[in-house]
Image (tube, helix red, strand yellow):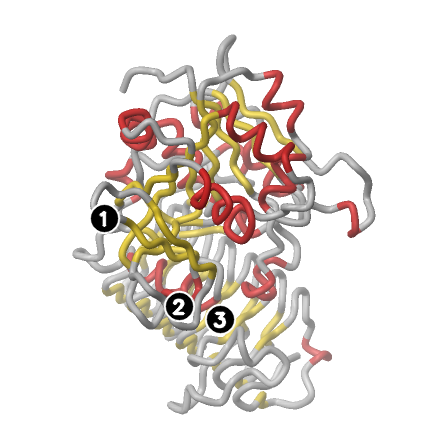
């Protein structure tokens, strides 16, 4: 792909991502591990690299340290060199919550100096928390061909999900003639992917025109659609917003299905191996004589002596003899003791599960978590980073065990469906 020096990329990676619950307790949403080897932001950064774009500003905000460490100099994605670069852009008005970015447009407005220091014909705005493959070069060509002021990447979404998105109504020429932000009664099935191409001058003028407009979807786009040339760029590939526990789990499970359309390796997705502790020197996975593995992803450095079915294991996970893991996601360096059962759970890094413990007991998945009923309601149990699940401990469905929980934090030997520690 030829380099396209005209377009500057702004990657919005500052969202709190609170619906991911304890997975974002110590990290920004785009820095959440994904698929054993990656972090969520790797997909956007790799798409930028594979589209031949070379200048990126990453707008951070919430708990940015792990994200900044992961991005580093940008070398993993070839963003180093005289005319290349990735720059971390934290909010720079102050440290109070009220100084934080109030929305996507406000975030870009606070970084006008970066736009002015990096002249370009177009600015591409991306989100750092989507799993997808996309050629931004093709979208730029479409934008130029249509002589658009703004182009919005859009895809067809089912009726049951469309209320979560901005919805565009288009004419025969793909021009957007109407807009609904997260509508209860949608007039179209075309959802915004949160990926925009703006003519740079138009973006600067629009942001300067009304300083009260803080969000692209709610404020900037409806105004632009009414007054200027806004077009929908049709997208048909795999794309998933992994902003909820359920969507995050489903996207990981898609990796295990041959026909799901997601393939990080074939997509050329890169990660920063050097930023991950001990990642570069992990040995190959080892399997004991009684190990059984079906339809799973097992990363380097894992030791499997038990059974792993339909699960994603990050580097360094140890599964002892007689342990069974099903339909689960384990982050790096988790230890699962002998005879333990993990069914439909997500374990953050360095979780220790004692011998004979059960995570995900019973078949009733419909009692939501008492503290966070909108986060956990499909049976998934979450175990926080560094937590200990004591030997013999039993956890039901939709439970939450907080970060660094110890044996004495549990109220008894059994945690019922929907309870938390």
Residue at 34 percent across and 40 percent down: it is 231
Distance in Å between CA atoms under marks 3 and 2: 16 Å
Query: Neighbour class for label 2 at 10 Å: few (<14), some, many (≥20)?
Result: many
- Which quarter of the figure has residue 296? bottom left
Q: Which mark is residue 421?
A: none
- Which quarter of the figure has residue 67? top right
Question: Residue 134 in the image: x percent, y percent?
Answer: 31, 38
**Quadrant of the rendering where the N terminus is positioned:** top left
Q: Earlier in the sequence, mark 1 or mark 2?
A: 1
Give the residue furthest to the front.
Answer: 227
Give the residue furthest to the left.
Answer: 259
- Does residue 63 show up? no
The secondary element bearing badge 1 is classed as: loop
Question: Residue 152 in the image: x percent, y percent?
Answer: 38, 42
**On the image, numbered disc 2 is attached to which residue?**
328
The secondary element bearing badge 2 is classed as: loop
Q: Earlier in the sequence, mark 3 or mark 2?
A: 2
Question: Residue 111 in the image: x percent, y percent?
Answer: 65, 30
Q: Which mark is residue 337?
A: 3
**Vertical side of 418 occupied by 381: above or below:** above
Query: Quick one: 248 or 113, which is closer to the camera?
Result: 113
Distance in Å between CA atoms under marks 1 and 2: 28 Å
**On the image, numbered disc 1 is attached to which residue?**
236
Query: Quick one: 173 or 365, which is closer to the camera?
Result: 173
Q: Are the two marked residues, 3 and 2, in contact with CB atoms closer than 8 angstroms?
A: no
Q: Earlier in the sequence, mark 1 or mark 3?
A: 1
Give the residue furthest to the top.
Answer: 82
């Amino acid at each position: 792909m030829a380099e396209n020096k005209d377009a500057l990329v702004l990657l919005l990676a500052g969202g709190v991502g609170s619906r991911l619950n304890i997975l974002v307790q110590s990290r920004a949403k785009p820095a959440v591990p994904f698929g054993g080897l990656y972090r969520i932001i790797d997909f956007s950064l790799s798409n930028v690299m594979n589209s031949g774009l070379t200048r990126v500003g990453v707008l951070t905000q919430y708990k940015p340290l792990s994200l900044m460490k992961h991005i580093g100099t940008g070398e993993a994605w070839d963003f180093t060199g005289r005319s290349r670069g990735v720059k971390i852009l934290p909010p720079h008005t102050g440290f109070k919550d009220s100084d934080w970015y109030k929305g996507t447009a406000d975030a870009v407005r606070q970084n006008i100096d970066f736009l002015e220091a990096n002249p370009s014909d177009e600015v591409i705005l991306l989100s750092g928390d989507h799993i997808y493959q996309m050629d931004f070069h093709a979208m730029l060509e479409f934008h130029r061909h249509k002589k658009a002021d703004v182009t919005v990447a859009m895809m067809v979404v089912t009726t049951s999900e469309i209320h979560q998105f901005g919805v565009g109504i288009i004419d025969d020429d793909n021009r957007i003639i109407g807009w609904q932000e997260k509508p209860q009664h949608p007039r179209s099935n075309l959802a915004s992917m949160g990926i925009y191409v703006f003519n740079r001058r138009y973006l600067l003028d629009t942001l300067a025109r009304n300083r009260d407009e803080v969000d692209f979807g709610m404020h900037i786009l409806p105004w632009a659609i009414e007054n200027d040339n806004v077009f929908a760029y049709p997208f048909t590939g795999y794309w998933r917003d992994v902003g909820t526990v359920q969507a995050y789990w489903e996207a990981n499970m898609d990796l295990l299905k041959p026909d799901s359309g997601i393939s990080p390796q074939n997509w050329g997705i890169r990660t920063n191996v050097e930023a991950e502790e001990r990642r570069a020197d992990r040995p190959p996975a080892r399997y004991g004589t009684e190990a059984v593995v079906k339809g799973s992803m097992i990363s380097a450095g894992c030791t499997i002596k038990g059974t792993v079915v339909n699960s994603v294991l990050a580097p360094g996970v140890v599964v002892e003899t007689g342990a069974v893991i099903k339909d689960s996601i384990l982050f790096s360096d988790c230890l699962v003791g002998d005879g333990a059962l993990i069914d439909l759970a997500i374990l953050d890094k360095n979780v220790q599960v004692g011998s004979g413990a059960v995570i995900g007991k019973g078949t009733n998945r419909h009692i939501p978590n008492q503290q966070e009923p909108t986060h956990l309601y499909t049976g998934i149990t979450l175990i926080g980073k560094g937590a200990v699940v004591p030997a013999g401990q039993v956890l039901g469905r939709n439970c939450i065990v907080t970060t660094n929980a110890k044996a004495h934090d549990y109220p008894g030997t059994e945690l019922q469906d929907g309870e938390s520690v």
